[in-house]
Amino acid sequence: MSRAGDNRSCRPAPQLHAVTGHLAAAATAVETAATPSAALAALADLEAACREAREWLAVDLVLIDGWSYADVGRALGISRQAASKAYADPVNARMRRTVMGRDDRVVIVPCGTAKLTRSTPAGRMYTGSYHQACRRAAARLGGQLVILSARYGFLDPDTVIEPYDLRMGQPGAVTVPTLRAQARRMGIDTAGTVTVLAGRDYADPATAVWPHAARPLDGTRGMPEQMARLAQLARAPTTPVDTHHQPARFRGVAA
């Protein structure tokens, strides 16, 4: 956008961060590249991230702030026709997801320390008892299963990944801006019912993406109580999901 008075509203920096914050990680990869080939690959990733951020911001400004395509074109230095051609389809797609997504159920489960030692779909990678308990409870809840990986972020169970050794809060772990970007890319950012079956280290970043998310494991003390709560959820004939749950304010990703 050009100047704060150009339109009815001008989004301040904290709100923009939710849309563009993932660019920082891509820019850092360019700065820290050790070889020319690594720098080229990092630049390609940064360019793709910039295209995504530009589209997301343009769509937000049209749908939330009431910008016209002429307004978007002025900010980008292109014509109204060019802006409409570039962003009309993403605007319509977001509107459809927003309307239809209100009834979507999404269940987030954490990754696990115990893993296979070869490339495999994320749904089969994690072999530990805690992850399996989360999966059984998620199956009872129903809805779209999404795995939160400390390295890869939000994963569809069919996505093939490499084994890794990383936990939330450690250097190199996925960041909240990246999770927000992934949720948009997966089309689940507007989900109406989200349940996070995880302890605080993983539930807090997910809650930063969906402030309305239910957190059934809140209040448990340690792994034994969490496992007992998960077993209870898995046994229940029907599991009520409290969509009005108000989690504690996001405190950052704890180690």
Image (cartoon, helix red, strand yellow):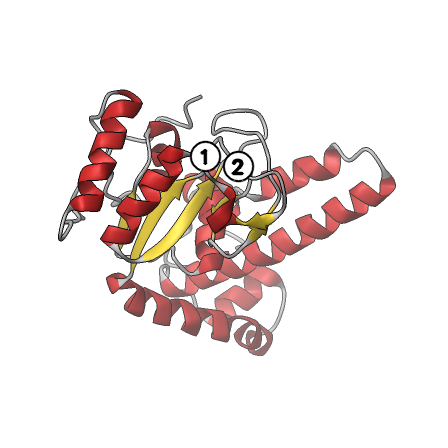
Question: Residue 140 location in percent, x, y?
Answer: 24, 52
| Type of the residue with mark 2 | Lys
How far across and down, in percent of the image, does residue 201 sit? 38, 28
137 relative to 67, above or below: above
Residue closest to the eye, 56 or 202: 202
Give residue 109's position: percent from left, percent from top: 37, 43
Residues at marks 1 and 2 touching, judged by CB atoms closer than 8 Å:
yes
Name the element at disc 2.
Answer: loop
Q: Which residue is mark 2?
A: 115
Name which residue lies at 32% across and 50% down: 107
Q: Which of the image's four quarters has the C terminus? A: top left
- Determine the CA span between mark 1 and mark 2: 7 Å
Residue 231, image quadrant: top left
Residue reaching furthest to the right: 36
Front residue of 36 and 148? 148
Q: Is residue 105 above or below residue 108?
A: below
Residue 188 picture quarter: bottom left
Q: Write the residue at 13% across / 52% down.
A: 237
Amino acid type, callout 1: Gly
Q: Nearer the viewer, mark 1 or mark 2?
A: 2
Residue 198 shown left or right of residue 33 in the figure: left
**Residue at mark 1:** 112
| Front residue of this view, candidates 55 and 222 | 222
Residue at image x 44%, y 42%? 148
Q: Residues within 10 Å of mark 2 (few under 14, many from 20)?
A: some
Does residue 84 appear anywhere in the picture? yes
